[in-house]
Image: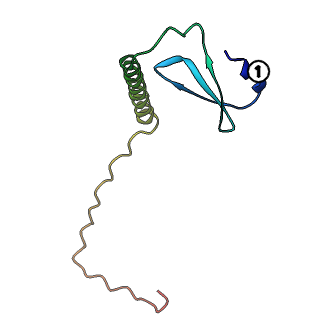
Amino acid sequence: MDPTLAGYVKEEVVIRYDPADLAEIRVFHQERFVCRAICQELAGQTVSLKEIEKARTLRRKQIRDGLSTRSAMVDRYVEIHHPSEPSPKSWTPEPVPSEVRPPLKRYIND
């Protein structure tokens, strides 16, 4: 809460805050400082650096688990809908009969 903010209703502002102190935010309008707004309900609470790190680590783990699950789903989808192509059969030339074939006649345009 801050009475100064009443003049900035429907205006685009930038809010900056300290993660360790969620009770206070700093408000900027057009790159100029406007005021500090303080939440009375959170004014006595602080968040320690260890709690922030723990929350970030937990969130990273959740994201990593979600990505691995989705990756497995995509692999399974590809496996089901795009079966692997059969390996190409090796080509073995047919044996040439013992009689000699006459060479092909080639023209200038070939």
Query: Considering depth in this image, is 10 or 61 the residue closer to the camera?
Result: 10
Camera-side residue: 13 or 62? Answer: 13
Q: Residue at 40% across / 35% down in the picture? A: 79
Which amino acid is tagged 1?
Answer: Ala
Q: Percent from the top left, x then y, of residue 70?
A: 44, 28
Name the residue rendered at 49%, 89% in the picture: 109
Q: How is the image coloured?
A: rainbow
Left or right, residue 65 beside residue 40: left
Q: Residue at x 68, y 17 (%)?
A: 2
Seen in the picture, residue 35 relative to 47 is either above or below; the reply is below
**Is residue 78 left or right of 23 when viewed as pictured?**
left
Label 1 residue SS: helix
Q: Is residue 81 left or right of residue 14?
A: left
For the image, the number of numbered tags is: 1
Classify residue 106 by image quadrant.
bottom left
Residue on which the image places disc 1: 6
> Considering the image in quadrants, where does the N terminus appear?
top right
At label 1, counting other C-alpha atoms closer than 10 Å, the crowd grade (few under 14, some 14-19, many 20 or more) is: few
> Residue 31 at what x, y percent from top left?
65, 38
Q: Is residue 39 above or below residue 93?
A: above
Identify the residue at horizontal 72%, vertical 22% (top origin): 5
**Quadrant of res 69:** top left
Residue furthest bottom as drawn: 108
Q: Residue furthest left?
A: 98
